[in-house]
């Protein structure tokens, strides 16, 4: 299973460990920004090829950009490697996506925290049928 090792934003190097164990150090300086596919309204995935086994490694760039949007899933569903991969991808996205480059990441995350707190409070006050069913079982 491949994993992201680190993203060095200062040198614009992404380090990936391939499933074969080979370490790839990908220079991302030629990527000014991650492009959006207007037709699909999604960002282009990043693709790399392992020089050892020729495996094509695709990295999804359409993940939530706030650290707080997936907390519920991180605690219950995601493996540690997936959580780590997403953290590294978020660091990369904040440097490479045009819509994020000039934003204040801390302020954005704070807005997300406040929104999620309001949403959770509303959900507690007005649970859906699915929420009620989970509570009863």
Image (cartoon, helix red, strand yellow):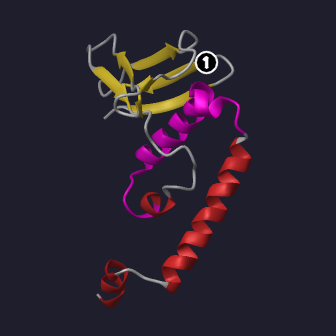
Q: The N terminus is located in which quarter?
A: top left
Q: Residue at x 55, y 30 (%)?
A: 6
For the C terminus, which image quadrant? bottom left
- List x then y, in percent, for residue 89: 51, 35
Residue at image position (50%, 31%) is 5
Q: Name the residue located 70 percent from the left edge and 56 percent from the top edge.
A: 110
> Which of these two is toward me, 126 or 59?
126
Q: Name which quarter of the figure residue 134 lies in.
A: bottom left
Helix, strand or loop for disc 1? loop
- Is the residue marked by circle 1 packed among few (<14), some (14-19), or many (20+) residues within 10 Å? some
Most common secondary structure along the magenta stretch: helix
Q: Nearer the viewer, residue 83 or 95?
A: 95
Compared with 115, 4 (above or below) is above
Q: Mark 1 — residue?
A: 12
**Residue 91 place in picture, x, y as percent:** 59, 35
Residue at the bottom extreme of this rendering: 136
Q: Quadrant of residue 131?
A: bottom left
Total count of labels: 1
Decide if residue 21 is on the left or right side of residue 88: left
Look at the image and give the residue range highlighted in magenta. 75-103
Residue 107 among magenta residues:
no
Q: Which residue occupies 64% across, 61% down?
A: 113
Q: Given the current orientation, which residue lies at the most extreme front position?
A: 39
Q: Tell me where residue 18 sits by quadrant.
A: top left
Q: Looking at the picture, does residue 117 appear above or below residue 50?
A: below
Residue 82 counted in the magenta span: yes
Where residue 21 appears, as percent x and y from the top left, is 35, 25
Q: Give the x, y percent position of residue 51.
A: 34, 10
């Amino acid at each position: 299973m491949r994993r992201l090792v680190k993203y060095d934003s200062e040198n614009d190097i992404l380090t990936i460990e391939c499933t074969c164990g080979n370490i790839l150090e990908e220079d991302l300086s030629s990527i000014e920004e991650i492009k959006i596919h207007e037709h699909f309204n999604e960002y282009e995935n990043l693709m790399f090829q392992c020089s050892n086994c020729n495996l094509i490694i695709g990295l999804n760039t359409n993940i939530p950009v706030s650290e707080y949007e997936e907390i519920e899933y991180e605690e219950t569903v995601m493996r540690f490697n997936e959580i780590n991969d997403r953290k590294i991808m978020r660091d990369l996205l904040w440097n490479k996506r045009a819509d994020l480059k000039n934003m204040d990441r801390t302020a954005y995350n704070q807005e997300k925290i406040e929104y999620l707190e309001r949403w959770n409070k509303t959900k507690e006050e007005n649970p859906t049928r699915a929420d009620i069913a989970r509570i009863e079982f």
